[in-house]
Amino acid sequence: MTQDAVVLRLLSKEMAEVAVTRGTACGGNCGSCESCMFQSELRVEARNLIQAKPGQKVTISSKSSRIFGAAFLVYIMPLLFFFAGYAVAALSGAGEGIRILVSFGSLILSAALLVFTQRRTKKEKAITFDIIA
């Protein structure tokens, strides 16, 4: 996955801090969705493979598999836990209220597991960026 960015400063000879502007859902027409109230610029560290200087516009790259994996963990896994909790409660013959409680409990469990595993494996599975052009 590639994105356009601007080099903010050099952290070392091999690393730079870059600013990546996120696109908005409204396409710049802020009156239609009000999403601009959220941070639209992300600052990340990137390996400076081309010796870019501060102020230069660059293209950064990251592994798509890492980004899709992170999206799966954050968006899909909690839903799977939610529905699995409901299904397990239904198969055990629980009433509707208990099914709902178990499904939300499973959702909270998935969030706790996500936070715990991400804190333990933060460095090994971190999304890294490279300045490629």
Image (spheres, rainbow, N blue to C red):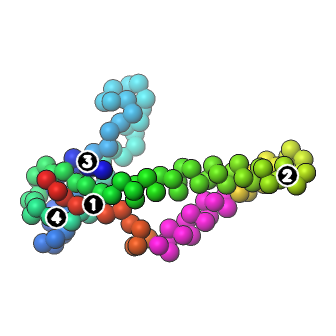
- Amino acid under disc 4: Asn
Q: Is residue 120 at all visible to an observer of this figure?
A: yes
Q: Secondary structure at mark 4?
A: strand
Q: Residue at x 33, y 30 (%)?
A: 27
**Callouts 2 and 1 close, C-beta under 8 Å:** no
User: Is residue 104 shown left or right of residue 40?
Assistant: right
User: Is residue 32 shown left or right of residue 28?
Assistant: right
Task: Confirm whether the magenta stretch covers residue 94.
Answer: no
Q: Is residue 101 at all visible to an observer of this figure?
A: no
Q: Secondary structure at mark 1?
A: strand
Mark 1 → mark 4, Cα distance in angstroms: 9 Å
Earlier in the chain: of badge 3 and badge 4, it is 3
> Residue 124 location, x and y as percent?
40, 73
Q: Residue at x 38, y 66 (%)?
A: 126
**Callouts 3 and 4 close, C-beta under 8 Å:** no
Mark 3 → mark 1, Cα distance in angstroms: 10 Å
Q: Residue at x 21, y 47 (%)?
A: 4
> Residue 5 location, x and y as percent?
21, 50
Earlier in the chain: of badge 1 and badge 4, it is 4
Q: Which mark is residue 129?
A: 1
Label 2, residues with CA under 10 Å away: few <14, some 14-19, many ≥20: few
- Amino acid under disc 2: Leu
Q: Residue at x 30, y 57 (%)?
A: 62
Q: Which residues are drawn in magenta?
A: 107-121
Q: Which mark is residue 3?
A: 3
Residue at image mark 2:
91
Earlier in the chain: of badge 3 and badge 1, it is 3
- Amino acid under disc 3: Gln
> Residue 77 location, x and y as percent?
59, 54
Query: Where 53 falls versus 58 (above or below)?
Result: below
Task: Confirm whether the magenta stretch covers residue 114.
Answer: yes
- Amino acid under disc 1: Phe
